Amino acid sequence: MSKLTDRISDLARPVVEEEGCRLWDVEYVREAGTWFLRVYIDKDGGVSIDDCERISRRLDPVLDEEDPISDSYVFEVGSAGADRPLKRPSDFEAFMGSEVEVSLYRPFQGAKTFVGSLEAYEDGAVVIRRGEESIRFEKDQIALVRLYVGLD
């Protein structure tokens, strides 16, 4: 995380936890010429729109007072989602054994996307199991790892 998103995480975490949720991620990104500050939350049983609204209303004045971002931006609070990205070692640890989708920068064995059960995470490298086969992807190969939500 950048220093800015670390600072915002520090400001958001107490508010999010007081509302019975967990802070999943913070991102500050530019899309179509507009800056967005997004706070992603999670909780057992799922996040409701009411959770997002309560946290947004409580966090907005904190951000205004602390003013960590001098430029104008759009502020959003949302659920981490069922297909949330896994970024930190603790994310991988929490979802060990879960189905994940690994997206690569360049094709490997003729594909750029692989789905399998998360078997290991070691210093940025990810190992997934597909049937009887384990596949290891090194950190520099991986563009994104997210939970896989298949269609049943």
Image (spheres, rainbow, N blue to C red):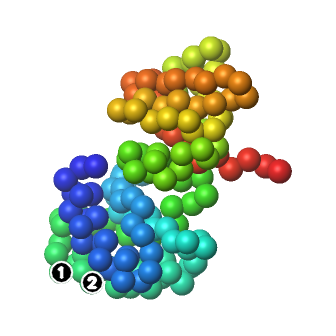
User: Which amino acid, mark 2?
Assistant: Pro
Label 2 neighbourhood size at 10 Å, few (<14), some (14-19), many (20+)? few
User: Which amino acid, mark 1?
Assistant: Glu
- In this image, 27 relative to 67: left or right? right
Q: Are marks 2 and 1 in contact (CB under 8 Å)?
A: yes
Regarding mark 2 in the picture, which secondary structure is present there?
Answer: helix
Residue 14: percent from the left, percent from the top?
29, 77
Label 1 neighbourhood size at 10 Å, few (<14), some (14-19), many (20+)? few
Q: Which residue is mark 2?
A: 61
Residue 32: percent from the left, percent from the top?
43, 51
Q: Which residue is mark 1?
A: 65
Numbered-mark total: 2
Residue 20: percent from the left, percent from the top?
44, 80
Regarding mark 1 in the picture, which secondary structure is present there?
Answer: helix
- In this image, 64 relative to 113: left or right? left
Residue 69 visible from this viewpoint: no
Is residue 142 positioned above or below 7 on the image?
above
